[in-house]
Amino acid sequence: MANSLTTNVTETFQKIYGEQPSMLLQAPGRVNLIGEHTDYSDGFVLPVAINLGITMAMRPREDSKVRVYSIDFDETMEIDLSDYQNTNDSWQEYIKSLAWALQEDGYELRGWDGVMAGNIPIGAGLSSSAALENIAAKAFALASDFTLSLAKMAILSQKGENQWVGVNVGIMDQLISAAGQQGHAMLIDCRTLEYEHIPIPDHVTFMVLDTMTRRELTNSNYNLRRQEVEQACEVMQIDLLRDCSQAMLCAFQEQLEPLIFKRAHHVVTENDRVLRFGEAMRTADLQKMGELLNQSHASLRDDYEVSSKELNTIVEISQAHPACLGARMTGAGFAGCALALIDAAQVDSFKQYVYDNYHAKTGIEPNIFPVDSANGVQVL
Ligand code: GLA
């Protein structure tokens, strides 16, 4: 990911603070292969950490001030750890959210100076926020001389985003950005937080299909979907949809409002698809993997209703290309990116075909690139 970012943050750090940074950190974004809108029901997900992310140059301070300059936003955040407020300042709140979550958890924090830059498209559904949260968690831990397990880092990053930023996200993005492994996807059980790294099969490529449409998660229907699945649980008297089988859901169909039934139906069937996709991936059953991706898209479009016109268009175009084994929207939805599993030998013709057809239908130029897997948060 990082060569040009590393040079950029290091040189900028020297210019601003007049010294070399003492540490360089890196955190990746992610693409979710399958398991969408299942994490907050304690279900299963299967994301990959990608070679796009955030790089931070930093140096611990002796006092309780935190100063971070963002090259991308050309803005500086400056806070004192003994007194800071939520001022709704976009990226800055994600760093403050970690100060808050760590302090709430009893950690004694010391200050640090930092310079950061990233290359994840923001709002595209590739988890720029989770990367920012994890890199802030790591910076606080290094500056304050404590270690955080990867699971703990993910839990506190999620807590910060839920309670400080105010978006009720699940644990997937934070955990994959913390614990991803190059060359592998990660099957996560969001109930136990246990995970398994599954090698990405040879001869296929996952392509990211960025529709170039954007959403604001805070303004989206994301929190509404969470309420809808909670309603389903209330009727069935269970804590979370992880505890619901397809047979059980069918037994309750009469008692659930049709819309609530559809929402629950997506989650319950998607959990099953994730486990089957994991099996297919272990045995490199590419056809099966593709079919499950197509089914996941249909379920997100029709049952969960988190797709969009552009996402459906790019997925349908992709599915029509002979190299494509399967395609679906990825991430929270409403806008952003889809994903296609294709024959690695046909990357160029696939890319050209999807570009031309999507552009012709929507007037928008999409951004199409292969998923290049990466490791989770690291000190370089
Ligand atoms: C966002 C959230 C995740 C997950 C996905 C949908 O990326 O951050 O926790 O819920 O949406 O699968």
Image: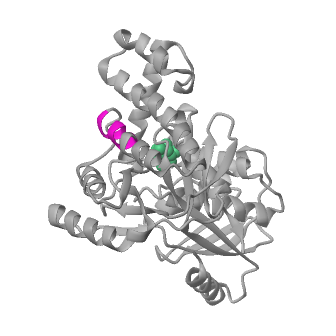
Q: Magenta includes 321?
A: no
Q: Specify how the rendered protein is coloured.
A: one colour
Q: Quadrant of the C terminus?
A: bottom right
Q: Magenta includes 298?
A: yes
Q: Quadrant of the N terminus?
A: bottom right
- Quarter of the image for residue 159 reads top right
Confirm whether residue 166 shows in the render.
Answer: no
Residue drawn 55% across the image and 24% down it: 240
Residue drawn 72% across the image and 52% down it: 150
Residue drawn 77% across the image and 52% down it: 149
Identify which residue, 155 or 177, lies in the foreground: 177
Residue 244: horizontal and vertical position, in percent?
52, 21
* Number of numbered discs visible in the structure rendering: 0
Residue drawn 55% across the image and 17% down it: 238
* Identity of the residue furthest to the right in this view: 145
Q: Is residue 110 left or right of residue 265?
A: right
Secondary structure mainly formed by the magenta segment: helix
Residue 92: horizontal and vertical position, in percent?
54, 62
Q: Give the magenta range.
A: 296-302
- Work out whether 235 lies above or below 155: above
Q: Is residue 176 left or right of residue 106?
A: left
Residue 60: horizontal and vertical position, in percent?
76, 72
Identify which residue, 296 or 364, lies in the foreground: 296
Residue 218: horizontal and vertical position, in percent?
41, 47
Q: Is residue 184 left or right of residue 259?
A: right
Confirm whether residue 130 shows in the render.
Answer: yes
